[in-house]
Image (cartoon, grey):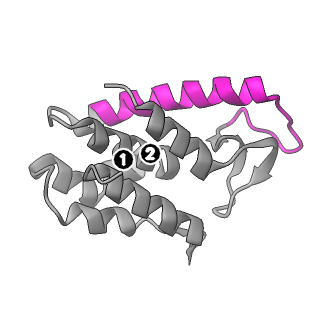
Amino acid sequence: MKTSETAKQKIREYEGLRLKAYKCPAGVLTIGYGHTGDDVKPGMSITQAEADRLFDRDLDRFERQVAVTVGTVNLRQCQWDALVSLAYNIGIGNLSSSTLLRKVRSHPDNPAIRDEFRKWNKAGGRVLAGLVKRRDWEARRYFGEV
């Protein structure tokens, strides 16, 4: 399954675009649309085209990881989009060990999943308004409301 254009736009919007490396609120060196990794160096700058390539590459990686993590659960497009957006932001390791994923695997339409999205609203130990907004969108997307 691939992420919808609507979700791609939202992920870009929530990640924001920064062409110069910076430390995110969690203290991780980041560039482009939330790209992290050993290839990001302090003082590094990239072009818009490079940011787009990194985004496409990262999104592809998260799509593959979410597919493996979710396993045989048959998801609707809206559910897929929400899970990929969450994984893109919190990392696949956090998603893999989450109560949210356990609920998705056992009953993907469980209404309690909405609250599980909203628990991932902190960075560096602080609740961030941007994460509250993103998690709200992801929860609503998951249930096909947006």
The residue depicted at 53 percent of the width and 64 percent of the height is 131
Disc 2 crowd rating (10 Å Cα; few below 14, some 14-19, many 20+) is many
Q: Quadrant of residue 41?
A: top right
Callout 2 secondary element? helix
Q: Which amino acid is tagged 1? A: Ala
Please report the bounds of the magenta region as a residue range: 38-67
Q: Which residue carries the number 2 mark?
A: 85
The residue depicted at 67 percent of the width and 64 percent of the height is 25
Q: Quadrant of residue 17?
A: top right
Residues at circles 1 and 2 in contact by the CB criterion of under 8 Å: yes
Q: Residue furthest right?
A: 43
Q: Which amino acid is tagged 2? A: Ser
Q: Is residue 64 left or right of residue 134?
A: left
Point out which mark residue 52 bears: none
Dominant secondary structure of the residues highlighted in magenta in the image = helix
Residues 29 and 13: in front is 13
Q: Is residue 51 magenta?
A: yes
Q: Residue 43: give x, y in percent of width and height.
A: 89, 43
Q: Residue furthest left?
A: 107
CA gap between label 1 and label 2 equals 5 Å
Above or below residue 96? Residue 133 is below
The residue depicted at 31 percent of the width and 25 percent of the height is 1
Q: Is residue 66 magenta?
A: yes
Residues 34 and 96: in front is 34
The residue depicted at 86 percent of the width and 35 percent of the height is 45
Q: Residue 140: give x, y in percent of width and height.
A: 33, 57
Q: Is residue 58 left or right of residue 30?
A: left
Point out which mark residue 82 bears: 1
